[in-house]
Amino acid sequence: MKETPAVCCPPARDDVDRRPVEGDEADEELAALAKAIGHPVRVKIVRILLRTNGCICGDLVGELPVAQSTVSQHLKVLKEAGLIRGEVDGPRVCYCIEPRALKRLRVLVGGL
Amino acid sequence: MKETPAVCCPPARDDVDRRPVEGDEADEELAALAKAIGHPVRVKIVRILLRTNGCICGDLVGELPVAQSTVSQHLKVLKEAGLIRGEVDGPRVCYCIEPRALKRLRVLVGGL
DNA sequence: TTCTTTCATCGTATTTCTACGATAGACGCT
DNA sequence: AGCGTCTATCGTAGAAATACGATGAAAGAA
């Protein structure tokens, strides 16, 4: 009954995001978020993390057609963009989506 | 009264897009679209083209902090991603948004 | 035709991205 | 302590992105 650690992935807060949807800052923000998901492997990672919302870890490597170090790099890109979060769970690391960032991306794209 | 040529920018068709929202193809598609807007200057270009929906031309260069050749390159990226369209109007070129592609991007991001 | 304007393309330099294998650190287990 | 597992980081190599000035092609104006 312990398929997924479920250590991380806290329940999403659903408060309102008051940051502007356009302007120079929003442009930079949108560009950065878009760039982060601007790679097929990273799209897949996001999808996997959403699907297994109990957020898996290095099982990602098994699901993706690239080497472990490459997956780690992509995870780093997503993390630096704020789209995911990693939490150490013993010897492994549990990644999960940062729902606020994803929502922000949707808002910014929707604002176009 | 002829601020903008208004030569291109046909009225947007609003038929339904039946392509899947996930799967390998959708992943590639989303990654490509996201990558295209994954640069601040290109975000600005998209915004300008949306605002002046009568689609302007090289006035873009005046609005952006980069050289003419660089703007041209960014326009090429957006065009190759299918997000914009250019139509020759005498000596100048009139660019405008491809609404279907933008909608597709929204759908794909929304599908995450 | 010649000049001017508008834009794309070329050539180039610099930076960033992508991917891999190898290595090292952290942790649990024996 | 020693071992195996998991993951990040390093080092490297090749590809792609970004930016610029210079050049060229196309169209209208003189």
Image (cartoon, coloured by chain):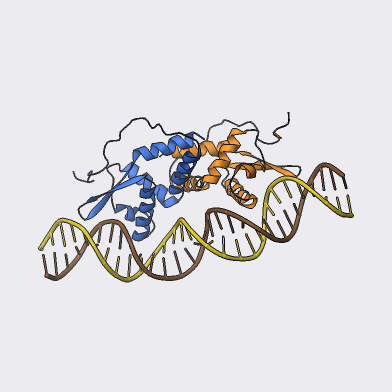
Chain colours: A blue, B orange, C yellow, D brown
Is residue B34 something one can see in this rendering? yes
Question: Could you tell me how many numbered marks the image carries?
Answer: 0
Q: What residue sits 46% from the left and 36% below the top?
A: A108
Q: What residue sits 44% from the left and 34% below the top?
A: A107
Depicted A2 relative to depicted C16: above or below:
above
Q: Which residue lies furthest to the top in this view?
A: B1
What is the x, y in percent for residue A98? 34, 41
Q: In which quarter of the image is the N terminus of chain A?
A: top left
What is the x, y in percent for residue A88? 24, 51
Give left or right: position of D15 versus A75. Answer: right
Q: What residue sits 36% from the left and 37% below the top?
A: A100
Give left or right: position of A100 versus B34. Answer: left
Give left or right: position of A13 versus C12. Answer: left
Quadrant of residue C18 within the rendered picture: bottom left
What is the x, y in percent for residue D18? 54, 53
Viewer-nearest residue: D3 or B20:
D3
Viewer-nearest residue: A68 or A83:
A83
Is residue B19 something one can see in this rendering? no
Depicted A62 relative to depicted B107: above or below:
below
Give left or right: position of B62 versus D30. Answer: left
Quadrant of residue A52 within the rendered picture: top left
Viewer-nearest residue: B81 or D12:
D12
Quadrant of residue A104 within the rendered picture: top left
What is the x, y in percent for residue A103? 39, 36
